[in-house]
Image (spheres, rainbow, N blue to C red):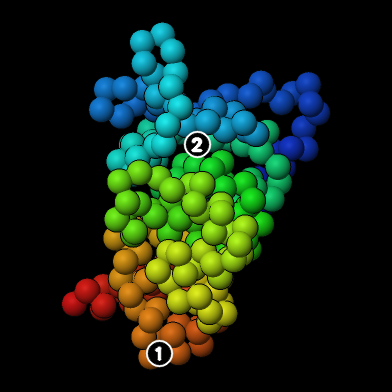
């Protein structure tokens, strides 16, 4: 599902007359149709009879979307997304729809997400990480307005430090599985772990997988 930055950039080089009309991303979960409406007014909705009702997409629903939305559907959808946000979303495969929800709910955080894509999975999974029954998007926006990215790190239970930020920025494959988030969050409080990860010039998905498996052992 992922595309190279060059491919993503070329999407907007065609004449406007050749660009298809905006489309929604549609999928089914638990027998109910759901959709993300076109950029820029992105709404996550579920079908209720003949109408669509807005509401958060749950982690389970997003997992269904990840496997149900085709590459072709994403290419058409991303035609209307600005270049920076399109390149950011192109960094994700399974977690792309979750990253889109974070962008849509937290537009003021977009610049920090583009600079630190690995923060997006933590924000997308904040209900699980913080143990809340519903999404706290307004709270995320308020925390960011008051404390910036370091305020968000603290709110997510991560060390609010430049070391943490540097480590997250060194993750080359930010499409972090949900099962990695809690072990990684816990380990970033350990000085030895911070030292090891901070001195890796780039942290690949395979390295991170080995690291998280070692923590769980």
Where in the figure is residue 135, as x and y percent of width and height? Answer: 40, 45
Left or right placement of residue 6 versus residue 113 in this view: right
| Between 131 and 168, the one nearer to me in the picture | 131
**Can residue 74 be seen?**
yes
Q: Residue at x 40, y 79 (%)?
A: 188
Q: Quadrant of the C terminus?
A: bottom left
**Residue at image point 66% right, 57% down:** 111
SS type, badge 2: helix
Q: Residue 16: percent from the left, percent from the top?
A: 79, 26
Figure quadrant of residue 206: bottom left
Q: Which mark is residue 161?
A: none
The numbered mark at residue 191 is 1
Q: Which residue is mark 2?
A: 71
Q: Which residue sits at x=62%, y=58%?
A: 145
Specify whether 79 is left or right of 130. right
Element assignment for label 1: helix
The Cα–Cα distance between marks 2 and 1, rounded to whole angstroms, is 41 Å
Q: Residue furthest right?
A: 15
Q: Mark 2 or 1 closer to N-term?
A: 2
Counting the numbered discs, the total is 2
The residue drawn where x is 78% and y is 21% is 17
* Residue 30 place in picture, x, y as percent: 25, 27
User: Residue 176: x percent and y percent?
Assistant: 41, 60
Vertical arrangement, residue 124 with respect to residue 194, above or below: above
Query: Which label lies toward us, 2 or 1?
Result: 1
> Observer-nearest residue: 160 or 72?
160
């Amino acid at each position: 599902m992922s595309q190279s930055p060059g491919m993503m950039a070329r999407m907007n080089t065609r004449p406007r007359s050749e660009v298809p009309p905006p489309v929604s991303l549609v999928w089914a979960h638990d027998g109910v149709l759901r959709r993300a409406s076109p950029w820029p007014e992105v709404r996550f909705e579920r079908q209720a009879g003949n109408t669509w009702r807005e509401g958060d997409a749950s982690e389970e629903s997003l997992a269904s979307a990840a496997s149900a939305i085709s590459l072709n559907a994403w290419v058409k959808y991303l035609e209307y997304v600005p270049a920076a946000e399109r390149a950011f979303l192109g960094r994700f495969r399974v977690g792309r729809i979750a990253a889109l929800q974070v962008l849509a709910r937290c537009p003021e955080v977009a610049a920090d997400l583009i600079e630190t894509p690995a923060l997006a999975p933590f924000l997308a999974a904040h209900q699980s990480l913080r143990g809340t029954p519903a999404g706290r998007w307004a709270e995320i926006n308020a925390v960011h307005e008051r404390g910036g990215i370091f305020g968000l790190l603290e709110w997510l239970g991560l060390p609010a430090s430049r070391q943490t930020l540097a480590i997250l920025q060194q993750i080359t494959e930010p499409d972090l599985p949900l099962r990695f988030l809690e072990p990684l969050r816990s380990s970033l409080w350990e000085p030895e772990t911070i030292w090891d990860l901070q001195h890796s010039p780039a942290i690949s998905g395979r390295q991170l997988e080995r690291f998280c498996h070692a923590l769980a052992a």
